[in-house]
Image (cartoon, helix red, strand yellow):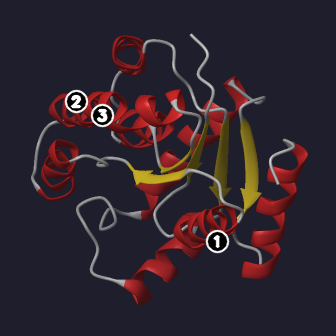
Amino acid sequence: MSLPGRFITFEGIDGAGKTTHIDALEQAWRQQGRDVVRTREPGGTPLAEKLRELVLHDSMDPLTEALLVFSARRDHLQQVIRPALARGAWVLCDRFTDATFAYQGAGRGFELGVLRQLETWVQEGLQPDLTLLFDLPPAVAAGRLQAARQPDRFEALDAAFFERVRSGYLARQAAQPDRFAIIQADARPEEVAEQVRETIAAKGWA
């Protein structure tokens, strides 16, 4: 069933710089008087935030990790995303299911068929209207993270892991090109911002 709102997700490896551009779009649209819901995954609800802490900091096998991520997603969809879209809001989400296919699927090497089944059960056909994929070499992202904060369980993984994650994202984009826009995130910040603006304008949403 089509919902009247718009669902926009922001994806990319850790250190890609998504947050800066989510901030800018959220602020611009709020100034226009739009109903904007800013959220993230894993997380977005009290229950999902608790599950996020487990996923980011506790050791577990890939199946447990995937189940926790999709459990958090289900609650997030039921409590936040679907109600916001039903009232016509613009939902800006920092990561969604593409991240699960990139991190747990490509990065961890977990069975993609199981992830597709979980996607079907949990999302019941709901997909983002637009996904902005902030793409850059993992070595550049790692340099940014090193200067920014203490790494979590994922951020501390090696370059080979993030090469696989990046490949997983690009595979999702290749499979669903109409939904994705690739943002060259290793450009200067103002150039990245311009790519985002042009993408939004091309959708008629500026």
Nearer to us: label 3 or label 2 = 3
Q: CA distance from mark 2 to mark 1?
A: 30 Å
- Label 3 secondary element: helix
Find out whether the residues at labels 1 and 3 contact each other: C-beta distance under 8 Å. no
- Where 165 sits versus 114, above or below? below
> Is residue 155 left or right of 102 when viewed as pictured?
left
**Image location (x, y in percent) of residue 77:** 36, 30
| Residue 71 marker | 2
Reading the image, the residue beneath label 3 is 79
> Is residue 145 left or right of 193 when viewed as pictured?
left
- Residue farthest to the front? 33
Reading the image, the residue beneath label 1 is 24
Nearer to us: label 1 or label 3 = 3
At x 70%, y 72%, the residue is: 186
Quarter residue 184 falls in: bottom right
Q: Is residue 94 visible?
A: yes
Tell me the kind of residue under disc 3: Gln
- Where 124 sits versus 86, above or below? above
Q: Quadrant of the C terminus?
A: bottom right
- Label 2 secondary element: helix
Q: Viewer-proximal residue, 49 or 27?
A: 27
Q: CA distance from mark 1 to mark 3?
A: 25 Å
Q: Earlier in the sequence, mark 1 or mark 3?
A: 1
Tell me the kind of residue under disc 2: Ser
At x 67%, y 49%, the residue is: 132
